Image: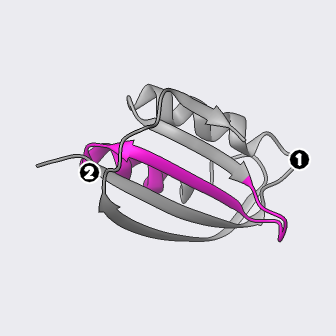
Amino acid sequence: MSDQRLSAWVHGHVQGVGFRWWTRSRALELGLVGYASNQADGRVLVVAEGAVDKLEALVDALRSGATPGVVDLVVESYEPARGGLTGFVER
């Protein structure tokens, strides 16, 4: 199966707590590329590309309760990978 792009909107107390760094670490462990970006409304947007099972593992990690801060809700969607991402960065 071809690579997919995950967009996950993470709601909760997830800014200023090391959440993006933690997410980057998990994504790199899974071999994913993409970014985690703070949003003006307090959410974090996680965009990642890779194999579907690895993306699902990242979503599971976001929901695990083991993240920094407090995750109240993760709303994810998938689409075909677009490419153009290198590494995994905090934005």
Q: Position of residue 1 (x, y in %)?
A: 11, 49
Amino acid carrying mark 2 in the image: Val
- Disc 2 crowd rating (10 Å Cα; few below 14, some 14-19, many 20+) is some
Q: How far is the residue under mark 2 from the one under mark 1?
A: 29 Å
Query: Which residue is disc 2 drawn over?
Result: 52
Q: How is the image coloured?
A: one colour
Kindly identify the residue that appears in the image at 70 percent across and 42 percent down: 20
Amino acid carrying mark 1 in the image: Gly
Query: Which residue is disc 1 drawn over?
Result: 16
Q: Is residue 14 above or below residue 18?
A: below
Confirm or deny contact between disc 2 and disc 1 (CB under 8 A). no
* Front one among 2 and 82: 82
Outermost residue on the right side: it is: 16
Stretch in magenta: 38-61
Kindly identify the residue that appears in the image at 88 percent across and 47 percent down: 16
Kindly identify the residue that appears in the image at 41 percent across and 69 percent down: 77
The quadrant in which the C terminus is found is: top right
* Front one among 34 and 28: 34
